[in-house]
Amino acid sequence: MNLLIDAILIGIPAFYFYKFGKAKTLKKILKEFGLFFRSGRKDAISSALIFIELFAASIAISLALSAFGLNDLGNVTNAIETVKKTAPLLLIYIFLVRIPAEELFFRSFLTKRLGIWLSSAIFALAHVSYYSTGEVIGAFILGAILAHNFRANRTIVPNIIAHILYNFIIIILVLV
């Protein structure tokens, strides 16, 4: 099922870029996705800054959810612990395939066509399977941060790195 989801996340934009865009070669499709490096230093700095934005926003979201009695992020914790116990290799898959696929689809593809807010709303809806209001709200806000940074940087590489690092740190904090 995961492979199918990720094939769709990558396949739809790739097909669109090939069929309706100017991208007729792999190199041009990758550029259309924003999948290129500017410079190692520039991308590293951008990745670090995006990660800091995501982490700071995550803390603020958790505090706000708690203040309003909406913090149901325990559902997400349970999901992570279940994956760790039943399919630990899935965590590696998520880091290597799912996160880049999400960034390519939601930021590179949808943000360009639907804008920051609508692409972030769709990203949030993709997180309803956690049965957590907090996760959906967080995904919307963090998705908007990622979308804004993609627009500013015009490359998806820093987003992918920051998103992987963010999820890695969150999973470590949950599992410790």
Image: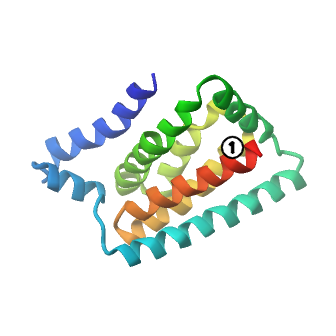
Q: Position of residue 29 (x, y in %)?
A: 20, 51
Screen quadrant of the N terminus: top left
Residue furthest left as drawn: 24
Residue 91 in view (yes/no): yes
Location of mark 1 (residue): 135
Residue 140 in view (yes/no): no
| 103 vs 164, nearest the viewer | 164
| 6 vs 140, nearest the viewer | 6
| 66 vs 100, nearest the viewer | 100
- Is residue 5 shown above or below 127? above
Locate residue 35 relative to residue 131 in the image: left or right: left
Is disc 1 placed on a helix, strand or loop?
A: helix
Report the residue at 30% width, 58% height from top. Answer: 35
- Is residue 65 shown above or below 59? above
Q: Position of residue 8 (x, y in %)?
A: 35, 32
Report the residue at 59% width, 25% height from top. Answer: 87
- Is residue 169 shown above or below 74? below
Report the residue at 47% width, 59% height from top. Answer: 161
